[in-house]
Image: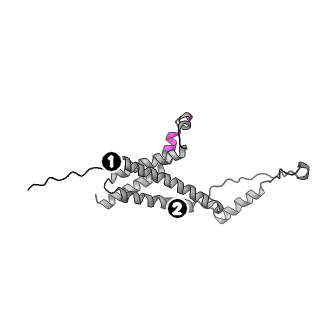
Amino acid sequence: MPVFIRIGLAALLSIALVYVGPQLLGAILAFLPDAFYEALPLHPFILILLLSGLLAGICLALIAPNRRLVSSGLVAFGLIALGSISFYSNLCSPEETQRIHDDWAAIPQYNLGQPLDQQPVQSAALTSVSYDCLLPETGWESAGAIAGDLLTSFLGVALGILLVPRRRQRPTPEFI
C-alpha cells in the first residue's frame, strides 16, 4: 500500500475515533458505579476525551509506524477543521438569536432590594429559553471550550503515539 494512502487512512481513522469515541466511551463508562467517578482526579468528560484520543493515537501509531509526525499533523489539522465546522454550524441565526432575546425579556425580573408592596408581582407565563445553538455574544466562550476539548483530545493522541514503541529497522547483512 502506498505511503500516502496509509498515512491518510491512519489520520482518518484517528479523527473518526476522536470524534465518535466520546459518545461510545461515555455510554460504556455510564455503567460504572458513582464511587469510580468520585475517585478520579479528572472530570469524567476530560477522562473520556483523553481515553478516546489515546485509543486514536495507538491506532495511528500501529497503522502508520514510520510516518507518525506527518499523520499526527494531519490529525491536528482534521481536528481543527472539525472544531471550526462544529462551531460555525452551531451558531444561531439572527432570527433565532432575536427569539431567544425576546424570550429572556419576557421572563419577569424582580428587584429584591425594593419592598414587596412597591413592586407588583408579574405573573407572565414563562416561555422556554432553552436553545440548541450558540449565541453570537457567547461565541468566544464556546470557541474556547471547543479549543480546550480539541487540545485535550490531541494530547491523548500524542500520548497514544508515544505509548507504542517504534519498530527498529533491522540492518540488512552485506555480503562481500
- Residue in view at x 31 percent, y 55 percent: 66
Label 2 – label 1 distance at C-alpha: 34 Å
Residue furthest right as drawn? 117
Q: What residue appears at the point 45 percent right and 49 percent down from the top-left corner?
A: 156
The amino acid type of the residue labelled 2 equals: Ile
Magenta residues, as a range? 25-34
Q: Is residue 4 above or below residue 49?
A: below
Q: Is residue 27 magenta?
A: yes
Q: Main secondary structure of the magenta part?
A: helix
Q: Residue 132: name its quadrant.
A: bottom right
Coloring applied to the structure: one colour
Q: Is the residue marked by circle 2 packed among few (<14), some (14-19), or many (20+) residues within 10 Å?
A: few
The residue to which callout 2 is attached is: 85
Q: Nearer the viewer, residue 85 or 64?
A: 64
Q: Residue furthest bottom?
A: 94
Please check the rendered image and state whether residue 72 is part of the magenta-colored stretch, yes or no.
Answer: no
Of tags 2 and 1, the one toward the viewer is: 1
Whole-percent x and y of residue 49? 49, 48
The amino acid pointed to by label 1 is Pro
Identify residue for label 1.
165
Q: Nearer the viewer, residue 22 or 168?
A: 168
Residue 161 image position (x, y, % from top left):
38, 50
Question: Sequence order check: which comes first, mark 2 or mark 1?
Answer: 2
Which label sits on residue 95? none
User: Is the residue under label 1 in contact with that under label 2 (CB below 8 Å)?
Assistant: no
Q: Is residue 8 visible?
A: no
